[in-house]
Image (spheres, rainbow, N blue to C red):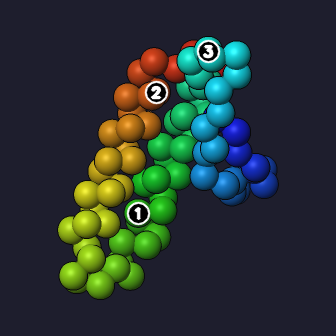
Amino acid sequence: WLAVRIFPQAHTNPIWIQVNNKPMTPKKGSVAWCLRGVDVCWEQKSKFYPPAEWDAARSAYAHARAYYTALLARSTSA
């Protein structure tokens, strides 16, 4: 993926690109950083969701965690 990053605090959401029709092989460190970002975002924002939106938000964050966890398992080192 491609992301614009302000080191070390922030970056855009990943923009998925494909080069020469090859599957992406992200680095474990990058994926772990994104996974931690999901958790930090949830910790910071979860208290502000209205009660009617809380279950949907929790489900969306769980989906993001599951995605990055699976991606982490197939990532390359470093």
- In this view, 26 is above or below 11: above
Residue 54 location, x and y as percent? 25, 73
Query: Quick one: SS at disc 2?
Result: helix
The amino acid pointed to by label 3 is: Lys
- In this view, 75 is above or below 65: above
Which badge, 1 or 3, is on the more N-terminal residue? 3
Would you call the spot at circle 2 few (<14 residues within 10 Å), some (14-19), or many (20 or more)?
Answer: many
**Residue depicted at x 36% and y 72%:** 46
Rendering quarter of residue 12: bottom right
Residue 4 horizontal side relative to residue 13, left or right: right
Query: Quick one: SS at disc 1?
Result: helix
Q: Quarter of the image containing the N terminus?
A: top right
Rendering quarter of residue 17: top right
The amino acid pointed to by label 1 is: Trp
- In this view, 24 is above or below 50: above
Q: Give the Cα distance between marks 2 and 1.
A: 19 Å
Which badge, 2 or 1, is on the more N-terminal residue? 1
Query: Quick one: SS at disc 3?
Result: loop
Residue 69 horizontal side relative to residue 6, left or right: left
Residue linked to disc 2: 72
Residue linked to disc 3: 22
Q: Quarter of the image containing the C terminus?
A: top right
Residue linked to disc 1: 42
Nearer mark to the viewer, of 1 and 3:
3
Q: Are marks 3 and 2 in contact (CB under 8 Å)?
A: no
Nearer mark to the viewer, of 3 and 2:
3
